[in-house]
Image (cartoon, rainbow, N blue to C red):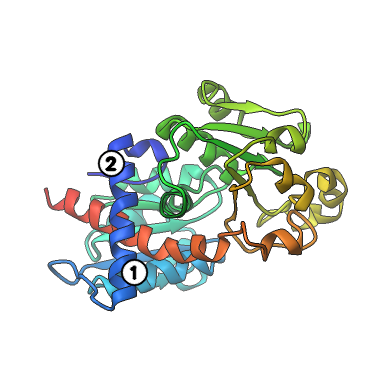
Amino acid sequence: MRHYLSEFDLTKEEFLNLVERGREYRAQWESGALETLDKPYTMAMIFEKSSTRTRVSFEAGMAQLGGHAINLSPRDTQLGRGEPVEDTARVLSQMVDIIMLRTFSHDIVERMAESATIPVINGLTDLLHPCQMLADMHTFAERVGDIEGKTVAWIGDGNNMCNSYINTANLLGFDLRIACPDEHQPDEVILERGAARATLAESAQAAAEGAHLVVTDVWASMGQEDEQAARELLFKPYQVNEEIMALADPDALFMHCLPAHRGEEVSEEVLEGPQSVVWDEAGNRLHAQKALIEFLLNAAEG
């Protein structure tokens, strides 16, 4: 049984094949000639964290593939009343074909996958956001081409997105420079494992120098709202603005997984500027998700 909990659940070849398949799905969507799967599969979507892009992309994606998605939240299910993750996994495995889980602790998706007899997708945890990486690499490929050998700057919080960029840098062979406050560096184990491709930069300016892609995320993620004011002061030197983008490669792209806080981690001018590809990046979640669903269901069918 194949799952997608981390970028390393795919080989480099599989990852790149999914990027290309996502581009095919986007072309179909734009032409109106949608390709469906061979039978009407059902996905259970479990949300312990709120979502716009993850929910819509998976739900619309399943519909476009000829299947169905069921939206579940803790208040709608026995998970919210203390049922063990393992029991939920076993029950859902008897009723649906694939599970997507968006939650806080990475341990929860790992426990779900260990007990499920169907594929499990990590829709986001506090540690990683691997589905976003498929969309980001899709977007870079359609705008620039092969990312291998290129330089990417991560500027801001060393959060789950930063951790996923470290993993993806090592999987696909690009160089990642990370600029973040000492108090908010990426996961120590992930950074150590990714040291061949990911390095800590002294400043946002040093990270951005000559970069082909500049990426950021909100300074206070879900569950950190009470830290917002303190983080704004600490992260102020890490805003991606026109001065930062001017240091990057002239053709550099800007990405953000959204939602964005204009005037905080990114300036209005950059977010709405010509180098920003955030809206295509968001839209490509739909097509990357369809490619992933197809891959995992085909693997489950043998």
Q: Position of residue 231 (x, y in %)?
A: 81, 49
Q: Which residue, given by chain and number where applicable, does mark 1 sit on?
A: 61
Q: Position of residue 35 (x, y in %)?
A: 20, 70
The numbered disc on residue 161 is none
Q: Nearer the viewer, residue 111 or 132?
A: 132
Number of numbered discs visible in the structure rendering: 2
**Label 2 Cα crowd, 10 Å radius (few <14 / some 14-19 / many 20+):** few
Residue 37 figure quarter: bottom left
Name the front one of labels 2 and 1.
2
Q: Residue at x 73, y 51 (%)?
A: 219
Residue 1 figure quarter: top left
Q: Nearer the viewer, residue 121 or 75?
A: 121
Image: 33 above or below 289: below
Q: Position of residue 106 (x, y in %)?
A: 50, 44
Left or right, residue 54 beside residue 162:
left
Q: Which residue, given by chain and number where applicable, does mark 2 sit on?
A: 14
Q: Position of residue 255 (x, y in %)?
A: 59, 53
Secondary structure of the residue carrying tag 2 is helix
Image: 181 above or below 243: above
Q: Amino acid at mark 1?
A: Gly
Name of the residue lying farthest toward the bottom: 32
Q: Residue at x 59, y 47 (%)?
A: 252
Q: Nearer the viewer, residue 60 or 254?
A: 254
Q: Residue at x 70, y 58 (%)?
A: 270
Q: Mark 2 to mark 1: distance in Å? A: 20 Å
Secondary structure of the residue carrying tag 1 is helix
